[in-house]
C-alpha cells in the first residue's frame, strides 16, 4: 500500500500514517522547493540529527531545535562554544548527540565562509534536471548519483553529517526531487 486515505479524505504517501503532524509536513513542506542559506542550513542540520532516527522524532522536536539553535541563524550558531555544547547536551527537547551538535556548529562556521546565497546555489546545483516520480515506494532509492555527488562535495568543503543517504533525504524534503508516489494528492497539484 503506497498511499493511504487520511481522515480528511486525501490520499497521501503511506509513510504519513495517521499522524497529523506528519500529514501537515507531507502536505505543506515535503517536496516543496526550499531556498535560502538559513533555511537550507536548518534542513541540513536537522537531517544530520535525524541520521539513525525516524524523521517524525525530529519533526516533533523541531520547535525546540529552532529555539536552542537560535533559529539556525548561521552567524549565531557559529559563535557557539563549549558552554553552549554543554547546555545543549542537557536539553531533553533535542537529540543530545555531541558529535551532531558539534557538527552543526562547525557547519555553521563553514556557511559563514560562503558568500550570501552561495550555499543555496551550491546545493541546488546538484538537483537533477529531471526526476522520474516513483510509482511505488519500492522505487524510491536511498541514494542517487546526485546525492552521492552532493555529499562528496560538501564533505570536501569540511561539512559533517552529510552522507549520501542524509543528502537524498534533504533533496526530497527540500523539493530538489519530488518522490510523492502516484495516487498521492500532491501528484495531482
Image: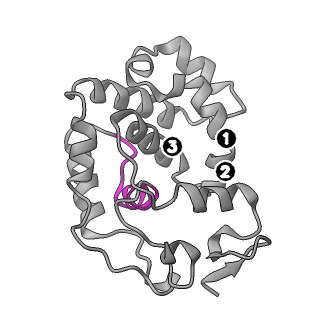
Of labels 2 and 3, earlier in sequence is 3
Q: CA distance from mark 2 to mark 3?
A: 11 Å
Q: Is residue 90 above or below residue 173?
A: above
Name the element at disc 2.
Answer: helix
Mark 2–mark 3 CB contact (< 8 Å): no
Specify few, some or many for label 3: CA neighbours under 10 Å numbering under 14, 14-19, or 20 or more. Answer: many
Q: Residue at x 21, y 68 (%)?
A: 129
Residue 161 within the magenta-colored segment of the rendering: yes
Mark 2–mark 1 CB contact (< 8 Å): yes
Q: Which residue is disc 3 drawn over? A: 46
Mark 3–mark 1 CB contact (< 8 Å): no
Q: Pinpoint residue 28: horizontal percent, then vertical percent.
A: 57, 56
Specify few, some or many for label 2: CA neighbours under 10 Å numbering under 14, 14-19, or 20 or more. Answer: few
**Stretch of the chain drawn in magenta:** 160-173
Q: Residue at x 68, y 75 (%)?
A: 10
Q: Residue at x 19, y 43 (%)?
A: 156
Name the element at disc 3.
Answer: helix
Name the element at disc 1.
Answer: helix
Name the residue furthest right: 7
Q: Which residue is disc 2 drawn over? A: 57
Of labels 3 and 1, earlier in sequence is 3
Question: Total label count?
Answer: 3
Q: CA distance from mark 2 to mark 1?
A: 6 Å
Q: Is residue 69 above or below residue 188?
A: above
41 sits left or right of 154 in the view: right
Q: Which residue is disc 1 drawn over? A: 61
Q: Pinpoint residue 147: horizontal percent, then vertical percent.
A: 30, 61
Amino acid at each position: 500500500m503506497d498511499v493511504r486515505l487520511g481522515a480528511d479524505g486525501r490520499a497521501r504517501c503511506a509513510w504519513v500514517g495517521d499522524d497529523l503532524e506528519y500529514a501537515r509536513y507531507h502536505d505543506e513542506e515535503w517536496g516543496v522547493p526550499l531556498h535560502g542559506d538559513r533555511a537550507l542550513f536548518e534542513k541540513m542540520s536537522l537531517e544530520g540529527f535525524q541520521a539513525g532516527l525516524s524523521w517524525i522524532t525530529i519533526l516533533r522536536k523541531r520547535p525546540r531545535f529552532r529555539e536552542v539553535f537560535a533559529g539556525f541563524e548561521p552567524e549565531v550558531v557559529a559563535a557557539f562554544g563549549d558552554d553552549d555544547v554543554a547546555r545543549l547536551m542537557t536539553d531533553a527537547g533535542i537529540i543530545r548527540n555531541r558529535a551532531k551538535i558539534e557538527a552543526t556548529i562547525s557547519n555553521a562556521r563553514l556557511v559563514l565562509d560562503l558568500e550570501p546565497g552561495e550555499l543555496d546555489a551550491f546545493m541546488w546545483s546538484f538537483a537533477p534536471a529531471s526526476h522520474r516520480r516513483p510509482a511505488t515506494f519500492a522505487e524510491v532509492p536511498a541514494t542517487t548519483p546526485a546525492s552521492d555527488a552532493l555529499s562528496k562535495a560538501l564533505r570536501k568543503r569540511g561539512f559533517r553529517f552529510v552522507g549520501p543517504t542524509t543528502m537524498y533525504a534533504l533533496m526530497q524534503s527540500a523539493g530538489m526531487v519530488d518522490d510523492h508516489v502516484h495516487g498521492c494528492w500532491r501528484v495531482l497539484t
